[in-house]
Amino acid sequence: MTRPIVIAVDGTAASGKGTLARRLAAHFHFAHLDSGSLYRLTALRILRAHGDLRDEVAAVASARAVVPADAGRYDLRGREIAEGASVVAAIPGVRAELLAWQQHFARDPGAAGAVIDGRDIGTVVCPDATAKLFVDAAPELRARRRRLELEAAGEPASEAAILAEIGARDARDRNRAVAPLLRAPDAALLDTSDLDIDAAFAAALALVRPRIEEALAARQRG
Ligand code: DC
């Protein structure tokens, strides 16, 4: 079997990693997986049933019932779902349920390669990824970008409240016992604080392109 070609894009909340991952996938004609959507779907099911996000049995059952294709059927971007996703993501059994599917996607993405964004892709899901990025930006700038996004989506919110939310989410994601948010030692750090999205994409591409082109060429050679 040919070795999978994977770009792992990890990073902090609202760092722009999702947009970068989508653009990298489009550039290389790779398949894209937003792994956060799996945790968001897990939380959504519990919230809809008015369940307790911290109830391990309910959360694991919810993760087991996740149908990844459902990510396109629901609006998962809301603040309550983001917060809930971070809560269920700290439960080891939930992560175990979602791990196999992500690794299957990496091996068999239905394209020449895969781009997966999340928190633990380069450390746990695909430690052998072809290229790894860790995306970050100053918290105040992430909060401003998220406020503008929410405003554009007709969901105005205070920047201070968003700043507090993403700070709490990062702290929870960083401090959990299993698969915490962490830069893999071999991940290239991309700080997008001073970059607009086009400049951030150009920087991301420059960081991953040599490895991806080499892997694609090696595959062609057989
Ligand atoms: O990337 P996102 O904002 O959609 O992720 C929502 C939450 O899901 C995030 O706060 C933590 C969790 N998550 C995770 O623990 N591991 C991943 N690979 C992706 C997301």
Image (cartoon, helix red, strand yellow):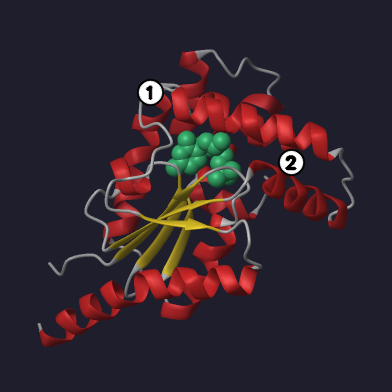
The location of residue 198, given as percent across then percent down, is 62, 74
Residue 39 seen: no
Q: Quadrant of the N terminus?
A: bottom left
Q: Is mark 2 within 8 Å of ligand 1?
A: no
**Residue type, numbered disc 1:** Gly
Q: Which residue is mark 1?
A: 93
- Name the side, left or right, on which 135 lies relative to 47: left
Looking at this view, is 172 or 189 the one in front? 189
Residue occupying the point 54% across, 56% down: 17
Q: Quadrant of the C terminus?
A: bottom left
Image quadrant of residue 169? top right
**Residue type, numbered disc 2:** Gly
Q: In the figure, 6 relative to 124: above or below? A: below
Q: SS at mark 1? A: helix
Q: Which residue is mark 2?
A: 78
Q: Is mark 1 within 8 Å of ligand 1?
A: no
- Name the side, left or right, on which 97 lies relative to 201: left
Q: SS at mark 2? A: loop
Looking at this view, is 109 or 164 the one in front? 164
| Alpha carbons under labels 1 and 2: distance apart | 24 Å
Image quadrant of residue 92? top left
Residue occupying the point 46% across, 30% down: 174
Q: Residues within 10 Å of mark 1 (few under 14, many from 20)?
A: some
Residue occupying the point 70% across, 28% down: 48
Q: From the viewer's perspective, is the residue at label 1 or at label 2 nearer? A: 2
Residue occupying the point 50% across, 30% down: 173
